[in-house]
Image (spheres, rainbow, N blue to C red):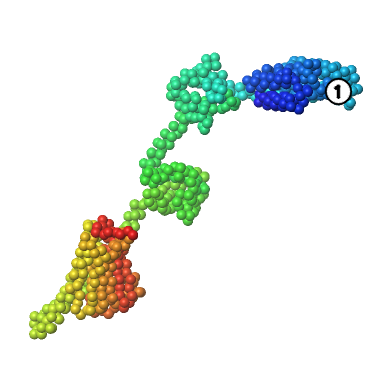
Amino acid sequence: MLFQLFIIWAISGLASIIFLLYNLFFDPGNFCIICNTALIVMNAAALICTANGRIKCSTNLVFAIPLILYAYYISDFNQHPPYIDTVYNTIAWLAAGLLILFFYSVTNGKIWLYLLMSYVTIVFQLLKANHLLDSLSYFQPLVLNPLIAFSLIFISLYLLRSFYLNILKSQEELITTTNQSINKVIQESTFSIAQLHAERDEAGNLVQLYVERVNNTFESVFKINLYEVQDQKADYIFDLIFKHKFDLNKIILSKTKKTREFHAVNMDQWFNIHVIQPSYNRFYILFENTTKAKQKLAELEENKRRYKVLLEAIPDIFFVIDKDGTYEDFVIKESDLFKIEDANIIGSSIYDVGFPKNMADKIFSCIQDAINNNSIETIEYQLNTPNGTFLFEMRLARLTNHSVISIARDITKRKTAEIKLEQALVKAEESDRLKSAFLANLSHEIKTPMNVITNFTRILAETELTQKEKIEFTEAISQNGKQLLNMIDNTIHLSKIETQTVVVEHKFCNVNSILRDVYNKYMVLVPDSKNIKLNLKIGVPNKEFGFETDQNILREIMSLLVDNAVKYTEKGEINIEYEMIRNEWVQFSVSDTGIGIPEEEFINIFNRFYRLNNKINDTTSGSGLGLPIVQHYVALLGGELEFESKLNVGTKFWFELPFSGGKGFLSVVK
């Protein structure tokens, strides 16, 4: 309302300044410095009164309009157009003042006084113009008569004022009725309610809150009367009630949370505090006493805890599942083990907790059968949890017409034991079969070299032989003895692998030294009958080069691979070598130009006691354990044995070991 009045006076002031400038520059003959100054001063004073909220002062300045109009258009000390030419200007200014009074004056007395002054001004101007008596005939049509025109404006504005006053009165009655209803509700409410009034500074900041009134429940709960708190500072009253434990400003000024929970320690009471702000400077604080609800909830929680403890004493998991398959409640003794929380289970469906769809469908079917037939259904299932997969046996029984109780027992240990027993049985049977095959093969493989050694030894002792024959027999005895020793070594290795007694000791080892030992060993063991060149290729020439691994196992791996290459190569060359791979791995390899391996036999060469059907195996003995032992030893060192072979061209075996704790290798960055 003040803003609208301020805008009206501002527009009027702007018009008076424009009017002053127009008279000064375009109509100097009618320029009246006193009149224009008075008009500007009136508007300025009205703006000041309005800005300070003084509506009465602002509206009283309207009574200066007839005086200013007299100075402008009627007085003799000012030059002005003919009186009759400015009479409608007078009506317009008077009507503007009348409009302000109609809408901003509280009493009708001011309106009638202004109306009288307006009629006097118009009559006086018509009299000066000598058209007062003939005004009814001078102004045609009749409504153009200044007195009649102003009267019509007055009647129109008066009717409009009466209309809005009636609306205002009905709204005031409605507000009064509403306030009475609100007051009655507040007074009879079971909540403790305090009505507060806010005092603010010029910037609108909250300075102080005062208690206007409290309802009956407030007086009863907090043992304080209305006359004791009325018009008192609110923070003082609440500090008195709650013993300085109540932060009123924090509750009032909170923008995000209008409801807070508060524990009155001195009263041992719990309250939900609601803040309502119906207007800019008025607040209602509602105290909802939740003590009984709190106590009831605590009692229910205690009962729930007690029964949960009793259920947890049983080594089973209890679920309550409704007929639609949704979990309603559960008790898990080892919930920390499964890392399952209420929020993850309750409200979730059996289709949401990790069951495969076919298993969830089966559980759902059992739920329906248990409810419809009042039967006990049993099903086994597995559940994936953050700690692994667990196996359960679930029994479902009807709890109500709409739900079942599910008792799930963890049978993981039992099932694991059963599986281990089955695996142990299979392994025992397989071991027995392997041992039988091993013993049968071993007896055959031992018998052949032993027969050679025995017979040739007897021949050497009993027969007259030439020197050349003696050398040949001696070499045969030596070769078969080596085969026998090699077979015994492989048997020992296999025994350690079977009993899992192979000890891996990761220590720094010199790679060049190990490979040179293997090279030197087989350099002299290559039969003279074979045209084979044995090559050693050092990947890093630094004699200090090495890394951390088990040197004995590495030496055995390379020895077995070289021995295999020598056995199946009749001519050509055998390469023993290694190289660095990306400064992270060391790749060892043994390649030959031997008879090669048929592609269809690739899947069999790592089988124990398996020997390929070729011309060399047909004339020599062997256990078929070399490559399986190498494969197992390579895996123990952290690598994987790989190979490539082409029939009658040759074979290459290689593996990569991690270059851990390496020394003697310099990486050149370009």
Q: Whole-percent x and y of residue 457?
A: 12, 78
Q: Could you tell me which residue is drawn at 76 percent across and 15 percent down?
A: 113
Q: What element carries label 1?
A: loop
Taking depth in this image into account, of 374 and 136 the one nearest to the observer is: 136
Identified at 43% across, 34% down, the residue is 301
Residue 257 shows in this picture = yes
- The number of numbered discs placed on residues in the rendered structure image is 1
From the viewer's perspective, is 375 left or right of 39? left
* Residue name at image x 50 percent, y 25 percent: 249
Closer to us: 320 or 146: 146
Give above or below for 658 relative to 614. above
Give me the residue at 26% from left, 75% from top. Answer: 573
Between 64 and 184, the one lying in front of the other is 64
Query: Where 508 sits versus 71, above or below?
Result: below
Q: Quadrant of the C terminus?
A: bottom left
Residue 419, quarter of the rendered image: bottom left
Tell me which corner region of the image, top left, top right, bottom left or bottom right, holds residue 12. top right
Q: Residue 144, percent across and down?
A: 85, 25
Instruction: Name the residue tied to disc 1.
Output: 145
Give coordinates of residue 442: x percent, y percent.
Answer: 22, 71
Neighbour tally class for label 1: few under 14, some 14-19, many 20 plus, Cα within 10 Å: some
Looking at the picture, tell me which residue is in the foreground, 352 or 43: 43
Locate the N terminus and report the quarter of the image it occupies.
top right
Position of 381 relative to 287 (above/below): below
Q: Is residue 500 toward the left or the right of residue 262 in the image?
A: left
Asked whether residue 626 is in view, the answer is no
Look at label 1 and name its amino acid.
Asn
In the rendered structure, the answer to whether residue 167 lies left or right of residue 281 reads right
Q: Where is residue 68 in the image (x, y as percent from the top left)?
A: 75, 18
Identify the image quadrant of residue 468.
Answer: bottom left
